[in-house]
Image (cartoon, grey):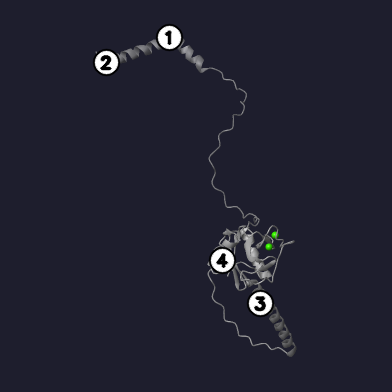
Amino acid sequence: MDLQAFAIIVLSWVVLVRAADPDQCVCEDKMNTCVVRDGSPGVNGLPGRDGFPGPKGERGEQGLRGIQGPPGKVGPPGQKGDQGPTGQTGSPGKCDDSELRVLKTQMQDLHTQLHALREEVTKHVKVLRLPNGIRVGEKVFHTSGLRGAYETAEAKCVQAGGVLASPRNADENRALLEIRKSHNENIILGINDIQTEGTFRYPGGETIGFTNWSKNEPNDAGGEDCVEMLENGLWNDFPCNGEKLIVCEY
Ligand SMILES: [Ca+2]
Ligand SMILES: [Ca+2]
């Protein structure tokens, strides 16, 4: 017997057995006649998920004008403009006699002021500062900053072609005082009364005509025959062996 014939026989036997069982048919009938009653409506479910974005809407109307913003930065300079036209030449003005008199008076006043100014400038130019010295009028005071007693000081100045500083007027005394201040040392002068006590002379032997003694000087206290310039420009006689700042005049 082949396999196909055996399967047909088994299948037929199963159909016959099921047809002969009455309970099988009753059960299927009962299931087919079940009664289903209507229930109450359920509650609403949760909201569903967002849908996909809709299509782009149409362009809206123009909004209101905004407030004015702050000023912007300064821009780069522009190009140089063309040269303007040449102006017309004016005609010379005319003055009447009264205006000429006023102008003449003003010119005279200016001339007077200029003359006064020139004299003032000349007066100040008399004193001219030099390196380590000063010029006053035709005279020059100069110092090397050395100190020494009278004989040494006088010898150094003669060796240099001059003499010890000997102011002969107030201008020269003021100029010498400038050196006194700048070096902060008393200056030994060429003036002395070595030859005759009480008679002060210049280095050349001439008696002095200008003096600037300090109060109660000269006093020849203990034999003072030489002269020094003090810090205030006044003079004092002192012993000739005292060492002071050497200033020569030329
Ligand atoms: Ca004396
Ligand atoms: Ca004295």
Q: Which mark is residue 157?
A: 4
Asked if the residues shown at circle 4 and circle 1 are in contact, with their CB atoms under 8 angstroms apart, the answer is no
Q: Which residue is mark 3?
A: 118
Q: What's under tag 4, amino acid-wise?
A: Cys
Q: Position of residue 69 (x, y in %)?
A: 63, 56
Q: Is residue 123 above or below residue 25?
A: below
Ligand 2 quadrant assignment: bottom right
Q: Judge the density around disc 3: few (<14), some (14-19), many (≥20) Cα neighbours within 10 Å.
A: few
From what the image shows, is residue 30 above or below residue 174?
A: above
Q: In which quadrant will I find the C terminus?
A: bottom right
First in sequence: mark 1 or mark 3? 1
> Which callout, 2 or 3, points to the residue nearer the camera?
3
Amino acid under disc 2:
Leu
Q: Nearer the viewer, residue 36 or 123?
A: 123
Q: Amino acid at mark 3?
A: Arg
Q: Which residue is mark 1?
A: 21
Does the numbered disc 4 mark a residue whose Cβ is under 8 Å from ligand 1? no
Q: Nearer the viewer, mark 1 or mark 3?
A: 3
